[in-house]
Amino acid sequence: MRPIALVFLLLVSYLCEAQFGSAIAFPNNSKRTTLDTSPEFFVLNWEEGTVLDISQTPMSIMVDSVGAQKINILRNKDRAPVLYSSNIVTPVCADGDCKLMHITLYWTLLGDYAGFDRSVEEPLTKHDHDEFLFTDYWKLHELLQDHNSILKRRAIDELVTKPKPSTIEGVDALSGATVKEVKESVVSGALYSCYVAWHLVHGKIKEELKAYTLGQQNEDMLLRMLNSAHTNYQMYALENLDQGQYKANFPRISELFKSGIPLVRSFIIKNMADMFVQSPSTMQPFWDALPHIDINTRSLLLQHIDTASEATVTAISTQLGVLTKNQLLKFLSHLENKKSLSAKILENLRRFAASSKEKNAYIVVQFLEDYS
Amino acid sequence: MKNVLTFLCVIFSSFYALSQDMLVEAESFDNPGGWVVDPQFVEQMGSPYLNAHGMGKPVENASTKVNFKKSGTYHIWVRTMNWVPGEWEAPGRFQLKVNQTVLDTVLGTRSGWGWQYAGQAKINKKQATHIELQDLTGFNGRCDAIYFSTKKNTPPSSLKKLTAWRQEITAEPNAPEDLKTYDLVVVGGGLAGCAAAIAGAEQGLKVALIHDRPVLGGNASEEIRVHTEGIYGNFERILTKIDTKHYPNGSAEAKFDQQKRDQNVKSYENIDLFLNWRAYDAISEDNSIKYVDARQTFTGERKRFTAPYFVDSTGDGWIGFWAGAEFSYGRESVDTYGEHWEEHGELWSPKEADNAVMGSSVLWGSTDTDTPQSFPEVPWAMPVAKDYAEVNGEWQWEFSRNDLSQIDDAEEIRDHMLRAIYGSFSNAKKDEVNKNRRLEWVSYLVGKRESRRLVGDHIFTFNDAKEGRKFPDGVVIEKRAVDVHYQTVLEDEKNPDFISEALFYRGPQYYIPYRSLYSKNIKNLFMAGRNFSCSHAGLGGPRVMLTTGQMGAAVGYAASLCKKYEVMPRDIYTGYLDEYLNLIEEQKYEKIPTSKK
C-alpha cells in the first residue's frame, strides 16, 4: 500500500502545481525591475517568454499609517502598457489587534483586478495568526475577481453582526442571505484581511488607472484588447472601435460572437444591426452560430430573420429544437408572412411537429393546421 | 354546490345544435381540497385554474356536485396543460372521478393550454353528479374547467375562440349588471394600493379596494413573503399599519404582519374591500376611465365599478393598459435619459434599447426534521436546475430573459422557477447531510419586480436619484441605494439562469415628484407601485415596498383634493399644490380629538 500512497501524494502535488502554479511563494517583488513570470494568481493569459519592464507612475494608493504606495506600470518589449502593479504594505486591524499585510497587486489597463503575488517573507495570516494555506490564497483570488462583491457595499461592522435567527416554527433554513454570501465569499478567519484587500483592489484607484490608460490609448491597444481572452478588454474594444475598424476586424468579431460571453455577443449584434440589411451575406457567420449561442443573443439574432437568405431560413427549420417557445413563434410568424413555403421547409416542420421528444412540437402542429 | 357557481346547462345553436352541455369551472368547485386557486395568468390563458401545488406530495382531492338537466352518456374534456412537455412523464398528472368511476385517462399530459379528452360517463339527472380531481404527483397539475357534452365536439383551444365560446355557453352579457359607485376605485392591494385606500378613506372618500388574492400586501403578503424595504418618508403613520418587520425574505413571520395589515385596512368603514376579485377590463371615454370591470376569482361573479378617479396599483399597469394609457417596457437606450454608469456599462444601461428587465422571484425554503424524508425524482426539472443544489431560495432566485415578457409569459417564468427549485432541492437531497430535510414552503405566486411602467407628466430616472434632484412636488422621499438586477448567466453561461445579482448605486436622498404618479394621457388615472412613471434604471431604487407605499399614500391624499375641487389629478399640481403639500404635512400625526384638547 505504501508505494501506492506515495505515488498518489506525488501525483496530487504535481496536479496541484500544474493547475495552480508552484506552491512556493515568489521572493519579494518590491525591488524587481522586470516581470518575467506570470503573477502566481492571475486572471489574464501569460504568454511563454513574456518579459515586462516595471517602471513607476505618478499614481499611488494612500494607506493609513504607512503612507503612499507607488503604482507601477508594466510594459512589453514594444513599450506598450500591459499591466499595473503595486507592492502594498497595509495594516489590518481586528478587535484592536493590528498587523501588516504584504501583497503585490496587479490591475489590468482598465483598472480591473488582474491578480496578486504573495510575499514569501511575510505570508498572509488569519485572525488566529495561522498562515494562509494555498487554498486560502486561492479563495482570496476568487474574492478579488468579484468586482461586485458584497464587501463593496457593507461597512466591516455590518459584516460581523449576524441577524437574529427566526423563532417562528418551520423555515429554519432561511438565514440571512447576506450572512451566507459573506461566509461563502471570504477566507474563513480572515474577514478583515479580505475586506482590506478587496477595497484596495476595487477602490478609487480603478478609475485613476483607467484614466491613465486612456491617455495612452491607440488603435494597437484597442486591437490587442479585441484579441484578448479577457471579457472586459473585449467589451472595451467593441465599445470604442469605429465602423471602419469593425469591418476591418470582422473575422475576430464574428469569432467573438460565437466564443464570447452572452453580454459580449449581445453587444456585438446590437452594434451591427444595420449590417443585416446592408450586407446580409456578410452576416452569414452569425446565422451559422444560431444553434450554439445563448438564448438572449439568439432572440436578438432572430429579430433580423427577415433579412436572412432562403438557405438560412431552411437551415433554421432543421434547428427548431433549440428555439424557445417565443423564438419559435417568431420564426413561424416569419414563415407565415412568406408568399409560399418550400417543400423542404414544410417537410422539416412536419418532422418536428410529429416528434414526441420536442416540447414545442404542438406549436408547429397548430401552425401547420392553420397553414394548410 | 353553491348557487353562485358558474355552470350552465344550455342547448345552443349551430355547431352544438341539440347537444346537452355543461361547463364546470374548476375554480368554482365546492371544495378545492388541497388544490389552490391560481388566478395569476387569466389574461394569458383565459381563466383562474386549480393548481395541485403539493411540493411533490399529491394534494387532497378537489370535489364538487353538479346537477344535470338531462340524463345520458356525456363526453368529457378537461382544460389543462402539461407544464413541462418532454421526454419524461408529465409532472402535473391527475385523473377525473365522476361519481364512483375514476376515468382511465391520465390528464395534464397535453402540451399548451387546451382541452384533453378524458372519456365518457353516464349521468343521471335525478341525482347530483359528484366530480373529483385526483392529483397523482403533487407537482402542479392544473385544471381550468371540465366540459361535458352529449356530442363529441372538442371545444376550441385558441384563446380568442375560447373566450367567445365561454361567453356563448355561459350566456354572459357583455357588461356586468351589478354597478358599484365610489369616490375612488383602487385596483391592486399591494402596499401601494393599501396605502392609497387608507389615505383616501381617512380624507372621507368612499373607496373600493379590489384585490385578486384572499390577503392584502402583494409581494409583502404571507403568500409571497418579501419584507418591506425603503423609508417611510412623509407617511410613517399609514405605512406602519401595513409594512413588515425586516425578517429574511421567505420567513414564516410574514403571517403576523399579514394579520396586522388585513385588520388595519378592514378597520376603515369607508373602504369596501373586494378580496379575490380580479379586474379584467377598464372602459374609458374621452381619455377618462368610466368603469373598471372585475370578476370574483372563485365564482366568476362580475361587478362594474365606477368613480371619478381610479388608482392603478396592479403592478403590471393593467388598468392603464386597458384604458389606453401610454406605457413603456424594457430598458431604454443609454442616451434616452443619459443614465450611463461607467462602472457597469451595458449591464446598467445598454447602448441600444432592449426587452431586458429585472426578473421575478419565487421564494422557497426547507426544514430539517428528525426522520429521513424522501423527495421524488424530478427529471423534468433537471434541464433547468442542472447540477445546482440548494435548500432554500432568497431574492437572488430570480428569472428574466429577453424573449419572455414579465406579463405575457408570467406563467412560463413561474414554472421555470418551480423547475429550478424542485431540481435544485432534488440535487441537495442527494447529499447525505440533507436526508432529513423536507420542503417546507414554495410560493406558487410569482413575485415581480418590473413590468409595464405607465407614463406620467414626469418620468423618474436614475439621474433624478443620483443627483438627489429636488422637485416642488417631491412627495415621495427615499434614501435606499438604487439597485438594478441582472441575470448572472449573462456574464458566464455556466451560471444557472435563475440566479441574479444586484448592482447598487449609493447616492443621496432622492425625491419622486407627484407628476410621476398620474397618467399623462388618461385624465383621471393615478398610478402607484412599480407601474409608476419611471425609466428602467429609475425603477431600481423606488421599486421597493415602503417607497411604493409612499406613492400610494400620496395619490390617496391627492384624490381627496381632486374630489374636493372636482378637478383632475394634473390640476392638483398646477392649481392646488400648496394645499396638497400642507395636507401631507398635517396627516403625519394622529389628530387629537377635540374633547381632549
Image (cartoon, coloured by chain):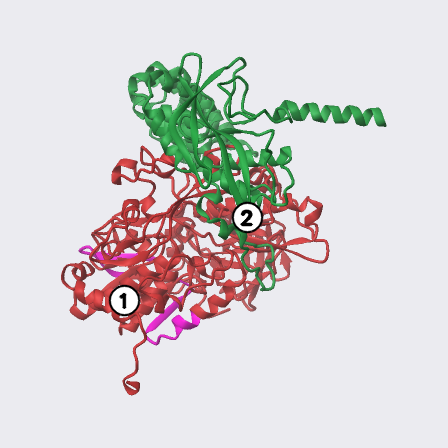
Chain colours: A green, B red
Tell me the CA gap for discs 1 and 2.
Answer: 58 Å
Residue lying at 41% horizontally and 57% vertically, measured from the top left: B229
**Dominant secondary structure of the residues highlighted in magenta in the image:** strand
Q: Amino acid at mark 1?
A: Leu
User: Where's the C terminus of chain B, which quadrant?
Assistant: bottom left
Across and down, in percent, residue A145 comes to 50, 34
> Which numbered disc, 1 or 2, marks the residue closer to the eye?
2
Q: Chain of mark 1?
A: B
Q: Residue furthest left?
A: B575
Q: Amino acid at mark 2?
A: Ala
| Circle 1 residue | B184
Residue situated in front as seen by the camera: B285 or B254: B254
Dot 2: what SS? strand
Dot 1: what SS? strand
As drawn, the label of residue A94 is: 2
Residue situated in front as seen by the camera: A140 or B311: A140
Magenta residue span: B262-291
Q: Chain of mark 2?
A: A
Across and down, in percent, residue B84 comes to 54, 42
Q: Residues within 10 Å of mark 2 (few under 14, many from 20)?
A: some
